[in-house]
Amino acid sequence: MSFYDPCQLIGLAVTNSYDLVELLQFPFMQRAIAGAVLMGILGGLLGSFVTLRQLSFFSHAVGHAALVGVALGVLLQVNPTGMLLPFTLLFGVVVLYFIDKTDLASDSILSIVLSGALAIGVILTSLIKGYRGNLMAVLFGDILAIDATDLILTLLVLIGSSIFLLSTLRQQILLTLNSDVAQVQGIPVQLYRYGFVVLLSLAVAVAIKAVGVLLVNAFLVIPASTAKLMSHHFRHFLIMSVIVGSTSSIAGIIVSGLFNLASGPSIVLVQFLLFIAVFIGVKLKLKTA
């Protein structure tokens, strides 16, 4: 087994940088970068509320349950994305309904539906015969494969999320801090909760093609968690989350192109390393203060 030393890695990056510049001339690479920016902004925006409302397990469940929608699409020989969007939307709303209508803890409900959906997904995938390229792409993601339709869908979800959250930001903040107080203040809590779940489910669906079912939750949670370490003021936190999400997505694509790595995992790896760096920086700053 051979390993690259640091000098060899630098030389490899320099060599591949010329290839990367050439790659940037191709439409698929330009679409990938545009998609990374849009999804990074979307992930940062929704991820801010996901982390504060402790919905990370919810997005995790929706992401894994999407496997059922993809498998159904492959079995029925229809576009997996066309099946994925309505399925994740329906799944998210139904899960929230179950949480509201039972006395069980939300994590118990999520564990039950996640396990059931994952079991159904595995069974359905076992029925798929022959080529499984679409299924593998959804599991592990490939942002280089996104097309104009994916960009339009992502942009629409981003616009819808921005209008819904930013136009009602004060109410959303109050709902995040204390839903009971928000209810007393006359805020339509249930409408806002279901509206957010709809947007979150759609965001998970459009991001799956880029980072895959297995990593989509990290795409929402890590940038927002990194931003939370850097700022405790909500508006600053929201802005930093969007910046971290978009810049780390672009950096991940560059790393993927330089070192010939998978694009989805590269993006999440960059986000993870950035989180570790910020965490260490914050801890060192506290010690020296």
Image (spheres, rainbow, N blue to C red):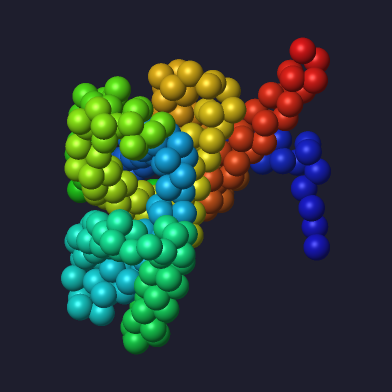
Residue at the outermost front position: 184
x%, y% of residue 265? 53, 51
Residue at horizontal 53%, vertical 21%? 232
Residue at horizontal 78%, vertical 38%? 6
Residue at horizontal 42%, vertical 25%? 238
Residue 42 falls in which quadrant of the image?
top left
**Left or right: 249, with 66 as reference point:** right
Residue 139 visible somewhere in the drawing? no
Image: 227 above or below 124: above
Image: 246 above or below 255: above
Front residue of 225 and 83: 225
Front residue of 45 and 151: 45
Residue at horizontal 39%, vertical 83%? 123
x%, y% of residue 159? 21, 33
Residue at the outermost top position: 289
Residue 262 visible somewhere in the drawing? yes
Quadrant of the drawing holding the C terminus: top right
**Left or right: 235, with 163 as reference point:** right
Residue 148 falls in which quadrant of the image?
top left
Residue 164 falls in which quadrant of the image?
top left
Image: 155 above or below 265: above
Quadrant of the drawing holding the N terminus: bottom right
x%, y% of residue 258? 57, 40
